Image (tube, grey):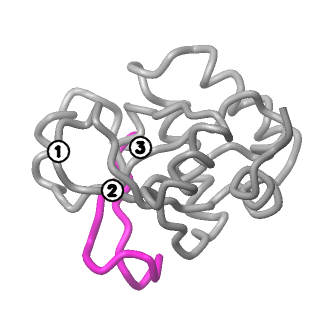
Amino acid sequence: MPETYPERHLKSTIKAGSVYYFYEKSIGSPKQHRFIVINVDPLKDTVIILVCASSQIKHFKKLRSNCPSETLVEITPLQYSGFTENSIIDCNEVFPKSISEIAEMLSKGKLQEKPVMDIRLVRKLRQGVIRSTLVAKEIQLLLEEEKSSGD
């Protein structure tokens, strides 16, 4: 089956730090959220690994109080211009998606592309996922392998 324009577009633009704004039903919130791509080379992987940003900092600190501190990464609008308020990324939960799933949301107008996040912040997010006791080992190993292959 030939690639759609949104799929071709994503394949030409997606990279570590790409940020997408969309609604994710598994979160249980009616609001859209920003999701950050943490793969080193998303095009070579069969799955895009996303983490979600939230402005509910106190909620996540309480929810994840038993998790390693590195698994909650706070980012300010000064650190990432795509945020309008201080945000937290819970690295204890990842959202795997395929390129076609992301492309479909884009083609239906259900996804917006945001400014790319600085790679130094993305590395912190990757390390948070690796340190998590709640994320599948397969995902952590993928990120560790990618980390050693260079950014």
Q: What residue is rendered at 49% in x and 30% in y?
A: 131
Magenta portion: prevailing SS class = loop
In the structure shown, which secondary structural element does the residue marked by tag 2 occupy? strand
Q: Say what amino acid the circle numbered 1 marks.
A: Ser
Question: Mark 2 Cα within 10 Å, few/some/many (few <14, many 20+)?
Answer: some
State which quadrant residue 44 falls in.
Answer: top right
In the picture shown, does residue 1 fall above or below 50?
above
Residue occupied by mark 3: 70
In the structure shown, which secondary structural element does the residue marked by tag 1 occupy? loop
Residue 29 - label = 1
Asked whether disc 1 touches disc 2, contact meaning CB atoms under 8 Å apart, the reply is yes
Tell me if 60 is positioned left or right of 122 in this view.
left
State which quadrant residue 85 falls in.
Answer: bottom left
Tell me if 9 is positioned left or right of 114 in this view.
right
Q: Say what amino acid the circle numbered 2 marks.
A: His
The answer for how far apart the CA atoms under marks 2 and 3 are is 21 Å
Point out residue 142 in the picture as x, y percentages from the top left corner.
71, 26
Residue 52 - label = none
Q: What residue is rendered at 46% in x and 61% in y?
A: 109
Q: Which is nearer the N-term, disc 2 or disc 3? A: 2
Point out residue 72 in the picture as x, y percentages from the top left corner.
34, 46
Tell me if 136 is positioned left or right of 88 in this view.
right
Residue 33 - label = 2
Q: Is residue 74 magenta?
A: yes
**Residue range highlighted in magenta:** 71-88
Q: Say what amino acid the circle numbered 3 marks.
A: Glu
Question: Mark 3 Cα within 10 Å, few/some/many (few <14, many 20+)?
Answer: some
In the picture shown, does residue 60 fall above or below 34?
above
